[in-house]
Image: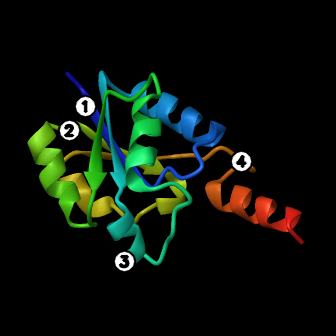
């Protein structure tokens, strides 16, 4: 069985997320998604609109996702890869080169993001409505 893993905040779940998860699932048999916890996001200087539990529930409802786990820190990736028998770590190409050290544990793939859509762009657009 070929297991794929990815990580992200997955705030304001949108079509770009769906398309990424669909492509990730096509790489193997099982897709595990690490959703960043609120505490981890705070350490990264990020604030999500939805809390971790809501974001995890939203992501787990996507037909391409087999399992959701909490992402509590950068350092957990190697242990997750080993624990779940991961074959491929994959993530959007905005992270290109940032996770190459994981190539010692599994294949690393950077996928092209859906153009003109992101949670940050949605937040920015929504904030302009109040102006």
**What residue sits right under mark 2 in the picture?**
86
Observer-nearest residue: 22 or 39? 39
Q: Quadrant of the C terminus?
A: bottom right
Number of the label disc, if any, that sits on residue 113: none
Q: Secondary structure at mark 1?
A: strand
Q: CA distance from mark 1 to mark 3?
A: 28 Å
The structure residue drawn at horizontal position 33% and vertical position 25%, both measured from the top left corner, is 28
Q: Is label 1 or label 3 in front?
A: 3
Q: Which residue is mark 3?
A: 43
Picture coordinates of residue 19 (x, y %)?
58, 33
| Identity of the residue drawn at 19% across and 21% down | 1
Few, some or many residues within 10 Å of mark 2 (<14, 14–19, 20+):
many
Identify which residue, 66 or 60, lies in the foreground.
60
Q: Mark 2 to mark 4: distance in Å?
A: 28 Å
N-term-proximal mark, 4 vs 3: 3
Identity of the residue drawn at 43% across and 49% down: 91
């Amino acid at each position: 069985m070929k297991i794929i893993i990815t990580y992200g905040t997955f705030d304001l779940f949108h079509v770009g997320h769906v398309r990424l998860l669909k492509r990730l699932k096509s790489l193997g048999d099982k897709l595990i998604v690490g959703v960043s916890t609120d505490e981890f996001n705070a350490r990264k200087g990020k604030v999500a609109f939805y809390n971790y539990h809501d974001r995890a529930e939203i992501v787990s409802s996507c037909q391409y996702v087999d399992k959701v786990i909490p992402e509590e820190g950068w350092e957990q990736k190697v242990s997750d890869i080993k624990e779940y028998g991961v074959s491929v770590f994959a993530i959007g190409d905005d992270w290109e080169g940032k996770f190459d050290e994981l190539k010692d544990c599994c294949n690393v793939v950077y996928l092209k993001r859906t153009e003109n859509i992101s949670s940050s762009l949605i937040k920015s657009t929504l904030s302009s409505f109040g102006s």
